[in-house]
Amino acid sequence: MTRIFNFAAGPSAMPLPVLEQAASEMTDWHGVGYSILEMSHRSKEFMGIYGETVEMLRELYGIPEEYEVMFVQGGGHLQFAMIPLNFAVGGIGNYAVDGVWSRKAFNEAQKIGEAAEVACTELRAPRQDELAVTDGAAYLYYCSNETVNGIRYWYRPEVNVPLIADMSSDFLSQPVDISKYGLIFAGAQKNFGPAGLTVVIARKDLLGRAESTTPTMLDYQTYANFESMYNTPPTFAIYISHLVCKWLLAEGGVKEMERRSILKSQKIYDAIDNSDGFYYNNIEKRSRSRMNVVFNLKNEELNQLFIEEALQKGLANIKGHRIVGGMRASLYNAVSVEAAEALADYMKAFAERHS
C-alpha cells in the first residue's frame, strides 16, 4: 500500500495507526462478534468507549471538573447558532472578526439576537487593545485559528466576560488553559477524528440559561444532562476520536504536538521567505498559522502546474480555498514532519526550475 502526504484542510490526514486499528476491528470489535458500526450507543461496550474518550480529553487538556465535555452533531455551523441561543440571552454577543469563520459566526449571531463586531482585522489577528468589548456583553467570541485565511491568535484574549473560542483547526495542537474559557468547541475533522462530530467544552455554571422555547437539541443543558446521548450520537466518529486520543497520549500529548507544529510550519514558512519572492505570504508574521500555511506564487500562471507536479511527488490537497486562492498546506497533528520536509523541498526545487 502506498500512502501519499495529505495536506487537506478537513476532512484531513488521520494517524495511520488509528486507521490501521479501526480497519482491524471493523468487522469484530474486541471479540464481541459485530462491528462498532453495529453497536448500540447505550451498550456497556460503547459507554466504555465514550467514557474513556472524555477522560482522555480531560487528561490531554487538564480539563477541570467544573467543565462539561459534550459531543454534538452539526459541525461548527451549528455552534454558530447554539452559542448565542444559550449565552446571549439578555445580553450582547461580542465578536472579534479576522477571517472567514469568525465572520460566519458573527453573521449567524445577528440572526438570533443582539451581536456586536468589536474588532475587525485583515491579514492578522486583532491585538488585545483592539478588543472593544461593549457594555452588556454576554461573551467575547473569537476563532483561535482561521483555517481559510491562515491566521492564528498568538495570545489568549483577556476580558471580563466569558471567553468563547472556535478551536476547530488547532484543537489538541498545543496546551490550553481551559479554566480561562467559558466555552470552546472544535469540529473533529481537523485534529480529533472524522467529520460528523463536534466536541464542546463548557463551564457548567454557564449552562441552563437558554430560553424555554429553545429547541431541545440546541440547548447545551440537554447534552450535559444526558451525557451527549439524548439522541443517538455519531458513534463511529466518537470511536475514532477515542483512538486518536490514545495515539496523542502515546505520542507525548499536546506539548509534543505543539513542538512538532512549530517545526513543521517553520519549514514551509522558510521555503516561502527564502524564495526571493517566488512565493509570498501576506499574513503578519506573529499571526501566521501553524496549522494552515497559506501562500501564493508570484506568477499565478504556474499555479496549476505547481499543484499537478506536487501530486506527482505524492503531495496532495495543497490548493488554496476558493475564497482566497493560492495554496494552502494544512499541517494538522497527523501530518508528519517528514511530510512538511517533503513539501518544503518540492517548493524549493519548483522555484529553482521556474525562476
Image: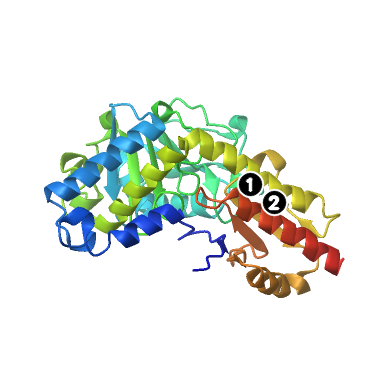
Task: Identify which residue, 251 or 307, lies in the foreground.
Answer: 251
Task: Identify which residue, 58 or 91, lies in the foreground.
Answer: 58
Image point 53% across, 50% down: which residue? 332
When asked about the image quadrant of residue 162, the answer is top left
Q: Mark 1, residues whose alpha carbon is within 10 Å: few (<14), some, or many (≥20)?
A: many
Q: Is residue 49 left or right of residue 300?
A: left
Q: Are marks 2 and 1 in contact (CB under 8 Å)?
A: yes
User: Label 2: which residue?
Assistant: 268
Q: Is residue 320 left or right of residue 71?
A: right
Amino acid on which disc 2 is placed: Ile
Q: Which image quarter is the C terminus in?
A: bottom right
Residue 319: image x %, image y %?
62, 66
Residue 184: image x %, image y %?
40, 39
Task: Identify which residue, 291 or 40, lies in the foreground.
Answer: 40
Residue 165: image x %, image y %?
44, 40
Q: Is residue 204 above or below residue 310?
A: above
Query: Regarding mark 1 in the picture, which secondary structure is present there?
Result: helix
Check residue 64 in the rendering and tell me which mark sits there, or answer none.
Answer: none
Q: Is residue 253 above or below residue 288?
A: above
Q: Mark 2, residues whose alpha carbon is within 10 Å: few (<14), some, or many (≥20)?
A: many
Amino acid on which disc 1 is placed: Lys
Q: Is residue 191 above or below residue 1?
A: above
Query: Regarding mark 2 in the picture, which secondary structure is present there?
Result: helix
Image point 33% across, 62% down: which residue? 23
User: Label 1: which residue?
Assistant: 264
Image point 36% across, 32% down: which residue? 59
* Residue 130 visible in the shown view: yes
- Residues at marks 2 and 1, CA–CA distance in whole angstroms: 7 Å
